Amino acid sequence: MAAARIRLLPETTANRIAAGEVVERPAAAVKELVENALDAGARRVSVCLEEGGIGRILVEDDGGGMGPEDLALAVQRHATSKLPEEGMLFRIATLGFRGEALPSIGAVSRLTLTSRNGSGGAFAIAVEGGRTSAVTPAAGAPGTRVEVRDLFFATPARRAFLKSPRSEAEAAVEAVERLAMAWPEVGFRVEVDGRTALSLAPQPREARIAALLGPDFATAALPVEAARGGLVLSGLAAAATHHRATGAAQHLVVNRRPVRDPQLKTALRVAYRDLIPRGRHPAAALFLDLPPEAVDVNVHPMKTELRFRDSEGVRGLLISALRRALAVGAGGAVPEGLAQGAAPGLAGEERGGFAEMQAPVAATPSWRPSPGWRPQAAPPAAPALPLGFAPPAPAPLPEMRAEGPLGRPIGQVLDTYILAEAPDGTLVLVDQHAAHERLTHEALHAQLVAGGVRAQPLLLPAVVELPAADVARLLDRAADLARLGLEIEGFGPGAVLVRATPALLGAPEPAPILRDLAAELAEMGESLALADRLDAAVARLACHGSIRAGRRMKPEEMAALLRQMEATPRAATCSHGRPTVLKLGKAELERLFGRR
């Protein structure tokens, strides 16, 4: 009889395999430990990281603490105080419930757990690579102190797949920020290699949202409130004119649990789909509360994805509430019946970047015949702005041909679209911002290929305050940004000094450019090639240096823009792939008017 080929794995090996599902990187360990502190009733949580959490993680809280008996059980797999009854698995009201975090961390690191409850002294227990020591008396304040050293020393293959210490630290700080958003009444502090990366006092929800998403979000935020059955949605969402380069500023919280649920993120994207440019992402802090039995949190190892009993109801509530809030924020009352329908479009308000968030641009209304209509005098034309392809000095615009393939400009529609007539009679519509964005992109790219984008020194260097992680990210790429004409240097722990900006952009505000570039660099990560990083940065700069929607242009400016489009490669689309020009020929017009 052949010997059996199947055998039971040793307990230590099995525990290390299981640990890989729970603790994939330092951020996951930090998340699990902070969740334990919150479940224990902590009102202040402190996190210290060394070497991105790979060398050391220290989490301290002022929660209820544990006695010696509970301490011994806490490091055993599947031991938990959060499921008093078996049926509670489908009515979970705590962040943790599986009893896997501490034993998983102990299986792949050197873990020391010190805790003290209100009825006695402190006790400690140690776990090293899955081997547990006895519980011993120790010194400690009320609450729990968890120290993790040499993470993944017992599984060196997993350690080899980690990113740089800075990237791992940023991920850990982000994990704490997301929990801090869900628990505003709790104070949080995070130190990275002795530097304070996050410091939040207990505060109301609105103040916590502003602290984490920034004052620019707070000024553009719209209240979101809705309820249906047992579902209650609340929070803040950004106006359609306020969008970001990545989805990092989307905070979704379900029953006090921060999640990255694909279904909720899709609903958020659908609500903004017709209101923001493709490739941009809305910012939001949304809180959904529903009965625990109406949601299953036990469907993902990291508990970041959920399964709803009434998924369509949740999706519909989120989309309709957001569309209702966005409709009001667009400047008008919600029309009757809009709450369950589509949000009205924002014609003529396509905007790229943050430069136009401060105040909405009033577009010229399109003419519709009515009994009370009277012609109005046009407002005085704004001073001509350099069009990227023209020198910023008072030199005249390039010599223009009377007419080219795109024809002669007739006027503007909504101060956003140039209306022209081509030589063959075709009606031409040009999106002035999208078109100029492409022209600026190509001009910046040409300068970059030729040796570097020409910089324009600022008369007075500008100081831009940013989160510490964004400052570090920008300073790491300072040499690359200098090639793009953006000269920066550090200015304290949370600020950047801007000495020069790309000359081609005129005189842009440095702060919006730096915020977008920091978000772009965070999204790209470390593995992207230098050429790809520079090309993405060029596209971002081009958006900030382009003519905006809502800006009235002179006839000679419109003509110059059309002529330059005719001479510029790839001018049929903007840097984000959207069309810059539409044409309506005789056949299309006859079809629209029912002539064929």
Image (spheres, rainbow, N blue to C red):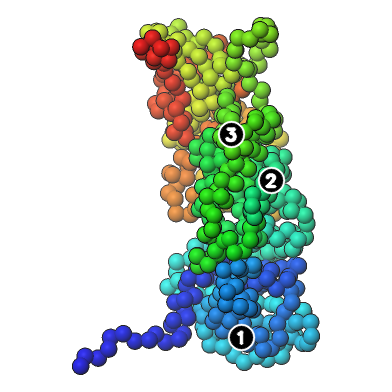
Q: Which mark is residue 73?
A: 1
- The three-letter amino acid code for the residue at tag 3 is Ala
Q: Earlier in the sequence, mark 1 or mark 3?
A: 1
How far separated are the C-alphas under marks 1 and 2? Answer: 43 Å
Q: Quadrant of the N terminus?
A: bottom left
Residue 370 in picture, x, y percent from top left: 63, 9
Amino acid type, residue under disc 2 in the picture: Glu
Quadrant in the rendering for residue 335:
top right
Badge 2 density bin: few <14, some 14–19, many ≥20, Cα 10 Å: some
Amino acid type at mark 1 = Leu
Q: CA distance from mark 3 to mark 2?
A: 16 Å
Query: Label 2: which residue?
Result: 225
Q: Is residue 142 above or below residue 369?
A: below
In this view, the residue farthest toward the left is 1
Can residue 235 be seen in this snapshot?
Answer: yes
- Image location (x, y in percent) of residue 177: 65, 58
Secondary element at tag 3 = loop
Can residue 55 be seen at all in this image of the molecule?
Answer: no
